[in-house]
Amino acid sequence: MEISRRKEPQPQAGWRRATVLIILPLLLAVPQMRAAKQQVLAAPLKGPYYVVRHGVFSFGTAPSGSTAAITTVPHWSSSFSFGGISYAFNMVGTSPFTTNITNTIPTVIQPITFTFAGGVSISPPTTALVNSPIFKSTTFPTGTGQFLDVFQRANFAKPVATNTAYHLQLGTPTVKSLMSVAVPRSAGVSAVTTTGRTVGLLDIAFLEGFLNNLIAAGQYSPGSLVIFLVGNVFEYEINTNNCCIGGFHSATSEALNQVVSFMFTAYNQSGIFSGGVQDIAITSHEVAEWANDPLGTNIVPAWGQPAQNTSICASDVLEVGDAIEAFSTPTFTVTLNGVTYHPQDEAFFSWFAHQSPSIGTGGRYSYVSPSKLTSPPPSCT
């Protein structure tokens, strides 16, 4: 399918948030927050379970009524057609169809420690992320490099076969000073899993307000990817039974025409989620989705969850991780300096664009496991 060029759109008002929502496989029900003391979670479920969530949120002040070019992460714009409808999209870097260069995106890590009522503090393993395949080169099934670079080259394997010098890399991250946040008793609780892991459960409404104020304060460059990093901290909606969101990515305006593109991610220990969801699994999910939808505006033909019921529409957003996350084993393993990591498998652009054959590596629709996605998604309602 031919890709056509288009003019850059202005971002929508508000904040489009894409999330990975994971139910802890090590609990039957999380006790409600009646006391400050640490809770002990009950028996495990067979999981994890996932819910696809997307939408436009009033979060921060977005550019409105301005025709001036926005300042944000470097990105290219194009569109594809399906069913007589043109679908516009933005992606990070420059086009692999028309450029033959290395794109290096400035990156900032903002580590955050959350302290819950009762005094339990949970901090992120910042050094572990910096030294992981998110930023360091290692061997993947289709090449050697950072996770995002190798995936995106495979995602657009057909044009990259000609434009062989095309790369999309994250720059050496600037690590901000560790930020400490006290969580009100009404907004979160710490708990211990049946495997002995201490976790924090955080009200996402509280987190959204916190990030809103943080970004509005102008601490982060709109030309960089900002990674808000936590450890074993996961979000819930309304109450702790609606848990657990491991990460999300989005873009919101810091000032008129200044759009900060960011992601929030947990770097979690093993023994909390099933399916190998540990260390860089959530981060890899979000960084791949960020690269393929940095402004949160990439609408595609509606699709059903491949690992569940494809006839029921789960999403209409170009979220390369969401199409894979519900499989029983969404991750795979790579090693770097003797350490084993668990990045998530991802869906290729061609799956969302209904391209046949796929322009992804080997004509596939999913990166590591071709059996996960064997053809574009069927119609759903």
Image: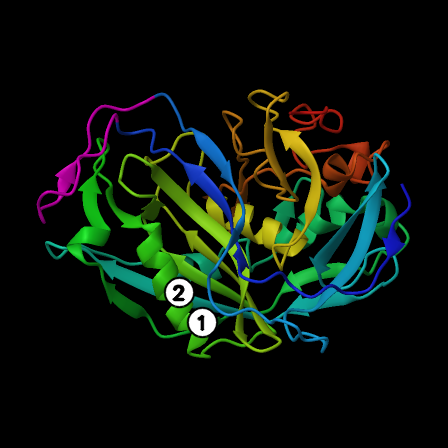
Residue 124 visible in the shown view: no
Image location (x, y in percent) of residue 57: 49, 55
Q: For the C terminus, which image quadrant?
A: top right
Image location (x, y in percent) of residue 202: 29, 50
Image location (x, y in percent) of residue 90: 72, 57
Determine crowd level at label 1: few under 14, some 14-19, many 20+ residues with C-alpha closer than 10 A: many
Mark 2: secondary structure: helix
Image location (x, y in percent) of residue 58: 48, 59
Q: Left or right: 238 with respect to 32? A: right
Circles 1 and 2, Cβ within 8 Å, touching? The answer is: yes
Identify the residue at horizontal 45%, vertical 34% (top origin).
Answer: 276
- In the picture, the disc for residue 211 is 2
Q: Left or right: 175 with respect to 285? A: left
Q: For the N terminus, which image quadrant?
A: top right
Camera-side residue: 279 or 59?
59
Residue 263 visible in the shown view: yes
Residue 279: in magenta span: no
Compared with 244, 304 (above or below) is above
* Amino acid beneath label 2: Leu
Identify the residue at horizontal 8%, vertical 45% (top origin).
Answer: 35
Quadrant assignment, res 241? top left
Give the residues in magenta.
28-45
Q: How is this picture coloured?
A: rainbow
Quadrant assignment, res 269? top left
Q: Main secondary structure of the magenta part?
A: loop
Which residue is outermost to the front?
65
Identify the residue at horizontal 43%, vertical 28% (top origin).
Answer: 49
Task: Name the residue beneath numbered marker 1.
Answer: 215
Identify the residue at horizontal 54%, vertical 77% (top origin).
Answer: 221
Compared with 373, 86 (above or below) is below
Mark 1: secondary structure: helix
